[in-house]
Image (cartoon, rainbow, N blue to C red):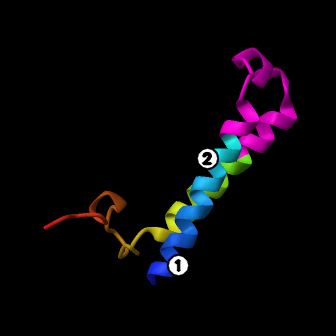
């Protein structure tokens, strides 16, 4: 993966985290639980960050556990 691609993916993850922070700023847990739109917005940003992070993961062969994908020698 090209350095530029990695930077773009990291930017997307950072942006999702910043949006989550903005969405929940000043909200209590009770506010969050009572606001389905807020929950949906926060969950969507977590989905974006997660799927973006998975794009950065090296592929694993069938039967290989993903925990072995980042093995350092």
Give the image location of residue 65, x and y in percent. Answer: 33, 61
- The residue pinned by badge 1 equals 5
Numbered range of the magenta stretch: 21-43
Give the image location of residue 28, x and y in percent. Answer: 72, 17
Q: Is residue 1 visible?
A: no
Front one among 29 and 23: 23
Which quarter of the rendered picture does the C terminus lie within?
Answer: bottom left
Front one among 36 and 18: 18
The disc placed on residue 17 is 2
Task: Identify the residue at horizontal 73%, vertical 49% (top origin).
Answer: 44
Which quarter of the rendered picture does the N terminus lie within?
Answer: bottom left
Task: Identify the residue at horizontal 81%, vertical 35% (top origin).
Answer: 38
Give the image location of residue 21, x and y in percent. Answer: 66, 37
In magenta segment, residue 32: yes
* Image position of 67 with respect to 60: above or below: above
Quadrant in the picture for residue 52: bottom right
* Image position of 28 with respect to 36: above or below: above
Quadrant in the picture for residue 67: bottom left
Q: Residues within 10 Å of mark 1 (few under 14, many from 20)?
A: few
Task: Identify the residue at horizontal 27%, vertical 62% (top origin).
Answer: 68
What is the CA distance from the residue labelled 2 to the residue labelled 1?
19 Å
* Image position of 31 with respect to 9: above or below: above
Q: Main secondary structure of the magenta part?
A: helix
Q: Answer with left or right where residue 49 lies relative to residue 68.
A: right
Q: Earlier in the sequence, mark 2 or mark 1?
A: 1
């Amino acid at each position: 993966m090209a350095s530029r691609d990695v930077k773009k993916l990291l930017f997307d993850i950072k942006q999702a985290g910043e949006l989550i922070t903005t969405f929940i700023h000043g909200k209590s847990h009770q506010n969050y639980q009572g606001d389905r739109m807020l929950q949906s917005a926060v969950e969507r940003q977590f989905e974006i960050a997660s799927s973006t992070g998975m794009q950065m993961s090296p592929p694993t062969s069938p039967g290989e556990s993903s925990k072995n994908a980042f093995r350092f020698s």
